[in-house]
Amino acid sequence: MDTKQPEALRLAPCPFCGGGARRTTVGTNAWFGTGCDGDQSCPAHLRALTHKTQAEADAAWNRRTPPAAAEL
């Protein structure tokens, strides 16, 4: 049995702290977001729900790039 998740469901680790990612949805209009599931002090900790679908939120998260060394 293949236990690998489809590409659309896999989330990259946080580019700042290396932690996992989490998906969030809220409200009657169902706004979605994907962000760092680590410590709230991480700059990538989820603060805004700005996507109309979870797929859009996940795609935006996975397009993130690691921070420059000066940002660390």
Image (cartoon, rainbow, N blue to C red):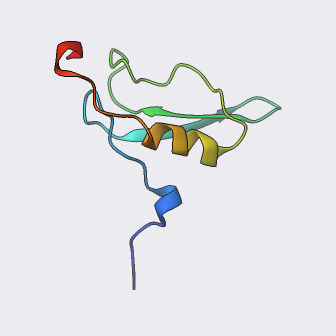
The quadrant in which the N terminus is found is bottom left
In the rendered image of this protein, does residue 4 appear above or below residue 45? below
* Residue 66 image offset from top left, x and y in percent: 28, 32
Residue at the extreme left of the image, as rendered: 69
- Residue at 24% x, 14% y is 71
- Residue at 52% x, 38% y is 60
The quadrant in which the C terminus is found is top left
* Residue 38 image offset from top left, x and y in percent: 33, 29
- Residue at 82% x, 31% y is 28
Residue at the extreme right of the image, as rendered: 28
In the rendered image of this protein, does residue 13 appear above or below residue 47? below
* Residue 39 image offset from top left, x and y in percent: 32, 23
Q: Is residue 13 left or right of residue 60?
A: left
In the rendered image of this protein, does residue 71 appear above or below residue 52? above
Q: Quadrant of residue 50?
A: top right
Q: Foreground residue, 46 or 50?
A: 50
Q: Is residue 67 left or right of residue 55?
A: left
* Residue 24 image offset from top left, x and y in percent: 58, 36
In this rendering, the count of numbered labels is 0
Q: Quadrant of residue 68?
A: top left
